[in-house]
Amino acid sequence: MRVLTAYFCFFFGVGILFFSSADAQEPIRVLILRDVPQFSIAGEELVLKDQTTGHLLFHNQKWSSITIERLPGARLRVRGSGISAPAFLLAAPRGSFAINGRRFRDQIHIYPANAGSLSVINVLPMEDYLAGLVNWEISSQWPMEAVKAQVVAARTYARFQKVTRQGELFDVEATTADQVYGGMDKEDFLSRKAVRETDGEMILYRGDPIFAVYHSCCGGKTESPENLWPGYFPYLKTMECSNCLGSPYFVWNYRVDGVRMRSSLNSMNSLGPRIVGLRLGQRSDSNRILQVTVQGERDHLNLSGPDFRRLLGRDLLRSTNFTVKEKDGVFLFAGLGWGHGAGLCQWGMKGMAENGENYRSILRHYYKNVTFGKFPR
């Protein structure tokens, strides 16, 4: 998951629609591939048509796999042939289909994007999306009250983003930029049970769905949103959290030499070939770094703590709550927690559930002065 990011994407006036059957549930548009030159799709009885004319472009009675490739202009290559049309439709009557080896359901929208690439968007019912999301974000084997808390937070976050991105092509990304979703392969009985038992329920502040951000482990204290995103989120507060000590990421270490660090900052050519020093600036109330001065051999660069972490890699520098020492050209980081630190702490959620708290009390702990209810579509 998990940042509030607005994307302003400029696309050619051509779209492709892949679909199977859909139901009447509220849909969610999930960006599953961004800026790719091509992708493969496989399924039974794939039927590709020009949506405008109904002209049959491809049909196979049995299982088949095709590659869709971007060509210059707003054109595509499918099975060796160039295709140009206002819209395309591919039916998969047998149900699910696989994109680059991962199974998805319902609809796929494909848009030729800038720079000769494609954006691929899965459109499916919200509740199916949530059932598939659980085991990408946490584990359905966690206590059921924790799984239900995850589902309600994810549903609320997705609904908030639907409103925020009304004029865009998608509602959420399938990555940590929003919420991690890899298709339907990890759905199971427990994830569906959590979705069913919280049917449509969301976290509300003054009657509206909240910006229900969450992260893996806060490392003992959550972060204030004003240090991360513009906007006003009165339900997100810095608070102590003693429930995530069981996380394997509560304490972490990372080491990197100055040359490799410089390569992570690949657009900062003025720094020179190697980073020789780091100076940590002010910290937030939750002890997270707000600014880092990066000293190269030729020049220095000031970065915000979150930008520094993003450039080095969020899976390597797990949070901005860290200290650093330099020894013989190697930088040794020691830190607490994993993620941006705001909102719900997933490992804290697990700890609270193991201590007997129900999902609503867990959510009230991390989101202040909220209520629960369904929200009109």
Image (cartoon, helix red, strand yellow):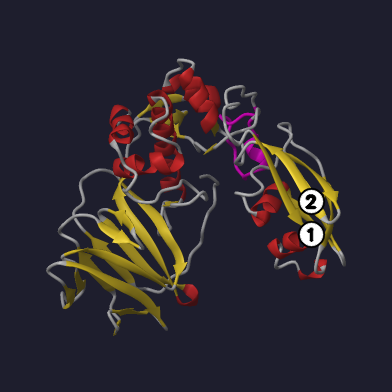
Numbered badge on residue 205: none
Residue 23 in the image: above or below residue 53: above
How far apart are the two marked residues, 1 and 2, measured between alpha carbons?
Answer: 7 Å
Residue 268 in the image: above or below residue 95: below
Q: Quadrant of residue 15?
A: bottom left
Give the residue furthest to the left. Answer: 61
Residue range corresponding to the magenta coloring:
222-238
Residue 190 in the image: above or below residue 38: above
Q: What residue type is disc 2 on?
A: Phe
Image quadrant where one finds the C terminus: top left
Say whether marks 1 and 2 touch (CB < 8 Å): yes
- Label 1's element? helix
Dominant SS of magenta comes to loop
Task: Residue at 31% x, 32% y: name it.
Answer: 190
- Quick one: label 1, few (<14), some, or many (20+) residues within 10 Å? many
Numbered badge on residue 331: 2
